[in-house]
Image: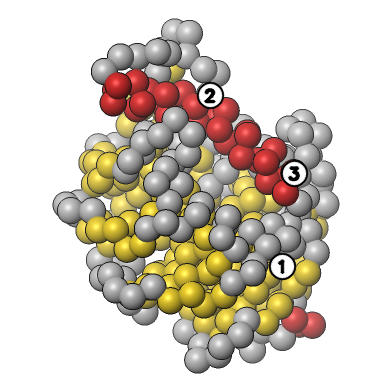
Amino acid sequence: MYEARIWLVAQFLWLMIGTAVAVAADNNGSADRPSCHPKFTFPAKVLAEDSPTIVFGISQLAIDKDAIYWTSNSDDTVKAVSLSGGVVRTLAKAQKLPAGIATYDKEVFWTSEAAGKVMRAPDKGGPLVEIASTQQRPYGITANADGVFWTTYGGHVMFLPKAANSPVVLSNGAPAWGIVAHGDQVLWAQGSYGPRGNALCDGSVYRLVAPYKPESKTEIASGQCAPLSIAVNDSAVFWTNYGGDAVMRQDIPHGQPSLVAKAEIPAYVAADNMNVYWTSSTAVLRAPISGGPVTTMIELVPDSGAPIRCQPGPIALNSTSLYFALDFKIMRMSR
């Protein structure tokens, strides 16, 4: 499992290195390598800037009605900023590779991958609470009125019911990645990884409805090629097949997997009831949820001689805007 994680990180580092080097060069006052420049289809605003490093950056985003939150691998912190921008608030430090993040009911939850912990804090800042430990490299996380759910590279999907002290195992198997809650249901992706071009298409997407009994989980899609990120709206679930260069959709509770769009190295995905958004190797794109014309929201254009790819970071949506991480910045674009 650990080797798969190392391979995936290496892929992302190669994809991100152009933008990371550009920021580091700006900070050092000289440019060692050519950089990538964003082209925005719609006006975009910088809300905050994170602490750039040559290696890691912003891992995941979460959003509520007041703020956007993110985990930062550059300095092992969890941070937040108002949806209109302003002062960046640090909610937690020394989190040892914070990864997934979620917010629900005035609380923020995140996974600390290297520490094997799952944490919680008030959304305005305050005491940190460890809600789980000794997890096998926890990754994705989500929450709803019933509790907190997370995935691990060790192949577990975990659930901590509200007011409970100990988590329960909902699923065992292949490495588990993206997870999302919507109402009283939770959906997640599990699957193995291999070198690009030779991905193991043994991945699955699962659905489980309250009261979240492990024996009641439903495999709603199988044979997926390295499913990674997952999103849901009122009628369907969407995911990226990182190893299959595809953005997929399936109606819930019943339906069959269908292709929304082909995409080179799709990573992050988000959706509302009209459109699905995703990141590819050099762009953030949008398409109608049932498929159709693809709109480029952001394109990263490299200088001559720049690295082959410059990968956009995570994305998030609310009713009016697309939020995204780019060059260690948190940005907002009307949509």
**Residue 215 sits in quarter:** bottom right
Residue 321: where, in percent of width, then height? 31, 52
**Side (left or right) of 223 relative to 284:** right
Which numbered marker is on residue 156?
1
The residue identified by callout 2 is 309
Instruction: Determine the image quadrant of residue 206.
Output: bottom right
Residue at image location 72% in from the left, 86% down from the top: 213
Circle nearer the N terminus (3, 1): 3
Q: Which amino acid is tagged 2?
A: Arg
Q: Answer left or right for 198 relative to 21.
A: right
- Regarding residue 154, the answer to whether it shows in the image is yes
Q: Which residue is mark 3?
A: 3
Q: Residue at x 34, y 27 (%)?
A: 23
Distance between mark 2 and mark 1 Cα atoms: 32 Å
**What is the C-alpha distance between the residues marked 2 and 3?**
23 Å
Q: Nearer the viewer, residue 161 or 270?
A: 161
Q: Secondary structure at mark 2?
A: loop
Specify the amino acid type for callout 3: Glu
Q: Position of residue 277 (x, y in %)?
A: 48, 47
How many residues crowd around disc 1 within 10 Å: few (fewer than 14), some, or many (20 or more)? many
Residue at screen point 73% across, 32% down: 196
* Contact (Cβ within 8 Å) of mark 2 with mark 1: no
View extreme (bottom): residue: 163
Query: How far across and down, in percent of the image, does residue 325 sit?
Result: 38, 43
